[in-house]
Image: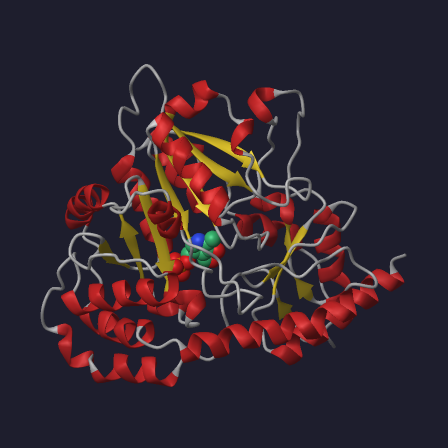
Amino acid sequence: MNERLELLTAYPFERLARLKAGISPPAELAHIAMSIGEPKHAPPAFVVEALRASLGKLDSYPATAGLPETRAACAQWLRRRFQVNVSPEGMVLPVNGTREALFAFVQAQIGNAGGATRPVVAMPNPFYQIYEGAALLAGAEPVFLDTTAENRFQPDLNAIPAEVWKRCQVLFLCSPGNPTGAVLSLDFLREALALAERHDFVIASDECYADLYRDEHSPPPSLLQAAVASGHDRFQRCMVFHSLSKRSSVPGLRSGFVAGDPALMKRFLLYRTYHGCAMPIPTQLASIAAWNDDAHAAANRALYREKFARVLPILQPVLDVVEPDGGFYLWPDVHGDDEAFTRELFATQNLTILPGSYLARDSRGPAGAGRANDNPGRQRVRISLVASVDECVAAAHRIRKFLETSK
Ligand SMILES: Cc1ncc(COP(=O)(O)O)c(C=O)c1O
């Protein structure tokens, strides 16, 4: 067996199931799930129709590189959304959702894992769990950059010493962030890129929430824009990850793409050819329809905004919570044990959220500088506003009641 599998920690939802085990929540309240980041808005009818209309195309193997039309639609979206010119030939690749691509990219990228100096994969903390698993299975050491209210949930790039950056082969960034909702500025991204150049590593920028943001006049920037602003017009050292799951509420379609540095892309394509993860043609045709349309994504964004607008006035008088700049999560500070908060909320209100500490790792801070057992997700919880507006409002009332009666 691959002994690295032993290094993987239990996925947050396994731990959540254990936390809830044996509890009988009040049967008169219907269960509300706010733990998983699975969009629940109706998928756009035209995307479903495009999928249905192309089901006859199952009679041939799809190419790993995808259809030229798929790559073109992705490149055109990047141009409209971020004003960047990405060649559909060699700079774009369709992937079956960003999850598999984030994982696979690290496997393709990490070199010399058995050598004398262990490669590092750096990532924000808390983080999307795939980053850590990908690093461990590739034989790299995960290094965590805590994102806390004190640093406005921006990873502190200066907290890692130069000798660690020297071992770094991949830096994960996530903007808008899961779970914090923080957006990384163009200046931050340029700083990260300068560091990547100095220490010769690659940035994997997870931008799967890029189309869900608060301010219509200031959409979150992409690492690709930072590359152009820094004179890297071939996106050297950059790989960005985009998805239709959140943008178009089609998590079941399993569709996204990667874009960036053609030298990285060439190797990644080779890896994927052997891995065997070409996107089915019907999925590609439905994806083209989705990437070509921005109106449904704007409507989707508006629906999340409505939820924040309805839910926050109910919660803010009793909970330390702010509206995030992007994404669809609330990340409140519960000023107490996040596991106990989650368990009691479920036990009394039949409402499931996720303890923040499950999404982060204990971090000893910069280079082991003494902050033992500091889990930056501790005392926070993640609340996904994925259900309908009415359900989210009902959930907010339950949380408020829970807090008012537990005082
Ligand atoms: C930060 C982040 N990255 C990636 C993903 C994976 O999304 P998908 O594989 O559906 O594109 C998720 C899903 O929850 C996520 O939250």
Vertical comparison of 38 with 237: above or below:
below
Task: Indicate the quadrant where residue 92 lies.
Answer: bottom left
> Is 377 placed left or right of 400 in the picture?
left
Q: Residue furthest left?
A: 60
Vertical comparison of 100 with 142: above or below:
below
> Is 335 placed left or right of 252 in the picture?
right
Q: Is residue 109 visible?
A: yes
> Is 336 placed left or right of 373 in the picture?
right
Quadrant location, the C terminus: bottom right
Ligand 1 - quadrant of the structure image: bottom left
Identify which residue, 103 or 12, lies in the foreground.
103
Residue beneath the point at 57% across and 52% down: 182
Task: Indicate the quadrant where residue 314 lies.
Answer: bottom right
Identify which residue, 288 or 391, lies in the foreground.
288
Vertical comparison of 313 with 52: above or below:
above
Residue beneath the point at 38% across and 23% down: 167
Vertical comparison of 381 with 191: above or below:
below
Q: State the count of labels.
A: 0
Where's residue 310, x and y in %? 70, 75
Residue beneath the point at 27% across and 67% down: 76
Where's residue 91, x and y in %? 22, 52
Residue beneath the point at 80% across and 66% down: 400
Where's residue 122, x and y in %? 45, 34
